[in-house]
């Protein structure tokens, strides 16, 4: 059975919040503290900061808390926390991978910018809830286009230097 799209989007919303709020609230000390990896390139780069990570955790979990009270189901709070943690960790792995490929911060990619946050969020939240395979496919496609659309909007609004 395919879950209604709205239900799928409400489920993944904490991951979206965790992935997008660092654009507004991030900055300051980078998560790699400026450190370089074995290849002489930055471990993660200046685009991954502790403040961004903390903001993503806070807003992602807060989204879960709101869903909990909206639906009268306390497990949305824990789900929100797990989705936020997964999204931020996946995004950080994505940057690590991009740096190892020699791409500078903000370099556009096909899939590496849009997928790791989504995949790791799903994986970490899966002990609590995992949509059907059809649902995951629908969400993956929706996430790809939403990511592209919101990043373009963030660029037009002056929040992001690059439109991807
Ligand atoms: N951000 C942050 N901390 C994080 C994640 C994101 O401060 N943990 C902020 C940074 O200002 C970053 C912006 O959100 O520039 C957009 O995030 P993202 O697109 O993931 O980073 P990029 O700058 O594109 O860097 P990368 O190439 O490493 O993905
Ligand atoms: Mg990026």
Image (cartoon, grey):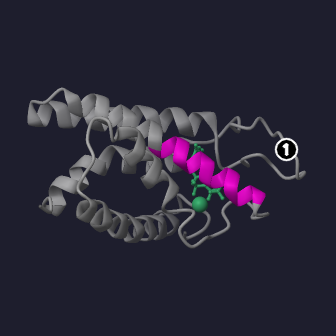
Magenta stretch holds residue 140: no
- In the image, taking residue 130 as reference, residue 100 lies left or right, namely right
Secondary structure at numbered mark 1: loop
Residue visible at 48% across and 65% down in the picture: 151
Residue visible at 30% across and 50% down in the picture: 12
Q: How many marks?
A: 1
Magenta stretch holds residue 93: yes
Q: Determine crowd level at label 1: few under 14, some 14-19, many 20+ residues with C-alpha closer than 10 A.
A: some
- In the image, taking residue 31 as reference, residue 134 lies left or right, namely left
Relative vertical location of residue 5 with respect to residue 23 in this rendering, above or below: below
Give the image quadrant in which the ligand numbered 2 is located: bottom right
Where residue 105 appears, x then y in whole percent? 71, 59
- In the image, taking residue 114 as reference, residue 16 lies left or right, namely left
Where residue 148 appears, x then y in whole percent? 45, 70
Per the rendered image, the range of residues in magenta is: 87-100
Q: Which residue is mark 1?
A: 36
Where residue 38 appears, x then y in whole percent? 88, 47
Q: Quadrant of the N terminus?
A: bottom left
């Amino acid at each position: 059975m395919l879950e209604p799209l709205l239900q799928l989007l409400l489920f993944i919303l904490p991951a979206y919040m965790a992935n997008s709020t660092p654009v507004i609230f991030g900055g300051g000390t980078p998560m790699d503290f400026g450190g370089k990896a074995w290849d002489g390139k930055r471990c993660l780069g200046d685009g991954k900061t502790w403040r961004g990570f903390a903001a993503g955790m806070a807003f992602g979990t807060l989204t879960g808390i709101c869903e909990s009270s909206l639906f009268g189901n306390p497990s949305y709070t824990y789900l929100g926390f797990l989705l936020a943690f997964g999204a931020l960790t996946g995004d950080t792995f994505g940057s690590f991978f991009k740096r190892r490929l020699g791409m500078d911060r903000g370099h556009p990619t096909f899939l590496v910018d849009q997928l790791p946050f989504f995949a790791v969020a799903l994986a970490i939240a899966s002990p609590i809830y995992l949509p059907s395979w059809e649902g995951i496919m629908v969400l993956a496609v929706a996430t790809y286009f939403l990511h592209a659309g919101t990043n373009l909007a963030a660029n037009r609004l002056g929040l992001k230097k690059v439109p991807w």
